[in-house]
Image (cartoon, rainbow, N blue to C red):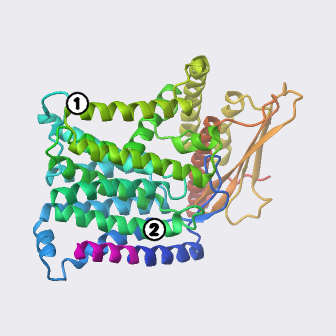
Amino acid sequence: MVTFFVAFLVSLLVALVLTWRVRERALAWGWLDQANSSRKVHVRPVPRLGGIGIVGGFFAPLCALFIVDSGVGDQFVSQTSLISGLFVGGAIIAALGFYDDLKGAGAKLKFSVQFAVALGLYALGFRIEVLANPFGAELTLGLLSLPLTVLWVVGVINALNLIDGLDGLAGGVAFFGVGTHFLLALMRGDVLLCLLMVSLAGAILGFLVFNFNPASIFMGDTGSMFLGFVLAAVSIKTSSKSGTAVALLVPVMALGLPIMDTLLAMVRRSLLGRPMFSADKEHIHHRLMSRLLLSHRTTVLVLYALCTLFMLTALGLSFANSIQSALLLSGIGVVIMVLMRKLGYLDVRHMDAVQQTRQRNLELRSLVRSVTAAVRAAGSFQEVWNAVRPLSQGLSLSSLELRLRRPHEGVNAGVVFESQHPDAGAEAALEVRLDVKEEESLLGALRLVWRDGRAAIDRDEELALEVVADAVAERVGQLVALEAAEPERIIALRR
């Protein structure tokens, strides 16, 4: 127990110091999460990259075991597959998150790296080989072991990433998952898993000092994906060493909230015709705030209570027989159904509206694909404008304007393209403006005006316009770079 306490204290102190230092550097260097989207809950820029503190806090006491001569250290060093999986895989996932926080990583890159790391874990012996069945004999997976293991690792990584929407939420959810695995490992006498969990618990608490509402720093993808990775890997070890009839159900229940939120997001986006990896403001924490009118902090505390319930259920399943397990699962199932009904997820009265939204979103996605493809093929500013113009008809705009400028030109310099719809209504105008920016360089703006009586655009249209603006910024940046390299190939456009 002394070793556990020392590991916890070291990880806590390292996480505290690292998070504080990263926050100061992020403020100085402008590494901030801007409040520039409707799905953002915070209203001011907040430093990101706080996940560095979690990563450093977790690895600090484990690295010390290579130096300090102790019985626990000898056990840890002898577990080469465990060390390789956690250190190498954790470092890769943390690096991926760090890159995403700084530069932005696309879905293809993220999933490629995550699947590669998951395959590496499988090769090192992190495998789900048996599916528990509380109502009968367990199921041996055989050839299905590989895909299920990979999907579990990738799924948990992204589940923690998706739940990271409120101050202190992802860290708190992970802490309850860590607590569950620690207690299970302690009851089995698994010293190494206990050590891993106390190290991660200390790192999370050290970060939460700065992240609980009102947060002064966010963990970013560096922290959320790393937490998901460690919990996914440890849960495989927990389930493989469990002697209960519900082995894999225990870690599933321990991570019940992020898994439930992820499944709901997948179903919701599929029904509404939204891209599977698009962001929205319909997660469980968002609905608690909007439908039950809870404050930011109260919402987090309510979700902590729900995590506690999942944690107790997971611990109960580890000791229960088949009948008791069925009763526990039925009970938690009733709680989930009541919660989903309260939050409006089971409301079937609006199915016609859902179908209309789905059709509209499919048309919108088709429009965005064609526009962005044309933008990326454009060879001049004029061709960029020609590629963007179909937005006017597709979005029923009364006016569309695109301003483009080179980085060295003044704010009012550059070129302006504009189109007006001759049959624009007489209603009050709704105007939306999106900056065309490449990193911190402002290259122009996209301005859209509606006169059809609407008071705001919906989230799906906002997402579509953000994708178009990003494509325009990327292509204009390339054209500006080409002009600087080969000025004779570019015909400058004047105002």
Residue 155 picture quarter: top left
Q: Is residue 163 magenta?
A: no
Residue 65's label in the rendered image is none
Judged from this view, the residue extending furthest toward the right is 426
Residue drawn at (67%, 33%), measured in percent from left and top? Answer: 391
What element does badge 2 sit on?
A: helix
Residue 281 visible in the current orientation: no
Tell me the residue that label 1 is attached to: 323
Tell me the residue that label 2 is attached to: 207
In this view, the residue in front, 211 or 484, is 211
Residue drawn at (16%, 75%), measured in percent from left and top? Answer: 73
In this view, the residue in front, 224 or 426, is 224
Residue drawn at (31%, 68%), measured in percent from left and top? Answer: 199
Position of residue 403 measured from the top left corner of the image (x, y, whole percent): 74, 50
Numbered circles on residues, count: 2
**Image vertical order of residue 366 relative to residue 484, above or below:** above
Mark 1 closeness class: few <14, some 14–19, many ≥20 residues within 10 Å: few
Position of residue 34 measured from the top left corner of the image (x, y, whole percent): 62, 59
Instruction: Give the magenta range.
Output: 1-13
Identity, as a three-letter code, of the amino acid under mark 1: Ile
Position of residue 299 measured from the top left corner of the image (x, y, whole percent): 56, 49
Position of residue 233 measured from the top left corner of the image (x, y, whole percent): 25, 53
Q: Is residue 2 magenta?
A: yes
In this view, the residue in front, 48 or 319, is 319
What element does badge 1 sit on?
A: helix
Image side of residue 133 versus residue 176, left or right: left
Residue 227 visible in the current orientation: yes
